[in-house]
Image: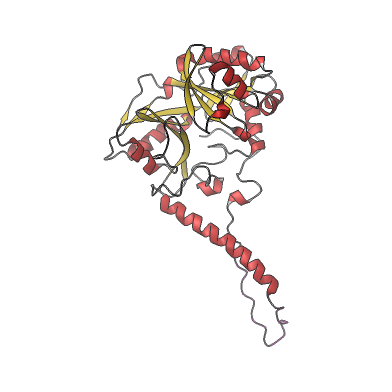
Amino acid sequence: MSSPSNSPVASLATPLAELHRQSGAQLGTWFGCSLPDHFGDWLAEYRQLREGVALLDKNYRAYLDFTGPDRVRYLNAILTNNIKDLRENHGAISLFLNPQGRILAEIETYDFPEKLFCLSYASIREPLIAALDKYIIMDDVTLTDRTADFATLAVEGPKAALVAEELTGVDPADLAELETRLVSVQRIPCRLGKRSPGGTASAEFLVDRAHAETLWKILLESTRKHGGGPAGYQALNAFRLELGAPWFTYDFGEKQIPHEAGLQDSHISYTKGCYTPDRKLSNVCAPVARSIASASLSNTTRRSRPRPAHPSSPKAKKPASPPAPPFLPRSTLRSAWPISAVKSPPPA
């Protein structure tokens, strides 16, 4: 069953909106939320992401708690990745699919003491909660919306790990991907998590929403000490396009299956057992492998095939229709995702 959060439902505006305006930021709509486009010079912010350190406002997320003795079995049965083998304070990124195998949501799941904690997107929060709640039938699981309670800030770039270690005593480079630690930043309790965009260890800070503004100011002072500063989503979008990193609702969504978005290796476990659309995905995987193999074999055969008879020859046969081109997964193409260099429109 679902239970309401103790806090009022948050709007799709970042809690740092007024602070951003005071600093001269231009706000725009990203992931359906009001977030900074830039802080005056998006090219300089882009260089900070690539070469130094940048501070990011990541308050486009929905936060969900799952408690109860069946929480692991329940989420493992409906998400595409392996939840039952998560270690405490570690996370995994998964997809929530419809029965036809199309992507309804991208969800990160973390194993915290006495609960599973999920991150998704605030723009789809209400339909996502309704869809997840539909599968809680006989399981002893309680879903609680915590979106109004938390905020996320991040430092990214080659110097991000140095900033995080100076403030918390924890070097993100020593953590596994999506591993988290409870830390304190100048007596503000928060949870530090590791991410590695482009292979560079960076840090995210999950904090109570009431402390978001204070933590932003502390992180901003530290990033500026290392030659960095705040970055908006124009710079972040350009940087992730350079990395070839797909964004949910921009590059994939309910019209795609995971293989069309190139997510079959990062978001899916093929060994954990069955889940809701597992048969659909299994049927997709097998033809892909067969098509690649047959394409390779047919090329070999064609080179050794004897020269055909002249059409006027009595031995000549009516040519067969050419075979359909083999299906190739997007991960084998030069561009793995249908991404665009221009800003995509916000989801409806």
Q: Examine the rendered structure and indicate whether residue 44 appears above or below residue 268.
A: above
Residue 94 % position (x, y): 47, 40
Of 173 and 188, which appears nearest the observer? 173
On-image quarter of the N terminus: top left
Q: Is residue 91 visible?
A: yes
Q: Examine the rendered structure and indicate whether residue 270 appears above or below residue 232.
A: below
Residue 24 % position (x, y): 64, 14
Q: On the picture, is 102 further left or further right than 26?
A: left
Tell whether position 262 is magenta.
no
Q: Residue at x 55, y 48 (%)?
A: 260
Residue 117 % position (x, y): 41, 30
What residue span does the magenta drawing correspond to?
A: 307-323
Q: Quadrant of residue 238?
A: top right
Tell whether position 308 is magenta.
yes
Residue 87 % position (x, y): 42, 34
Q: On the picture, is 240 further left or further right than 187?
A: right
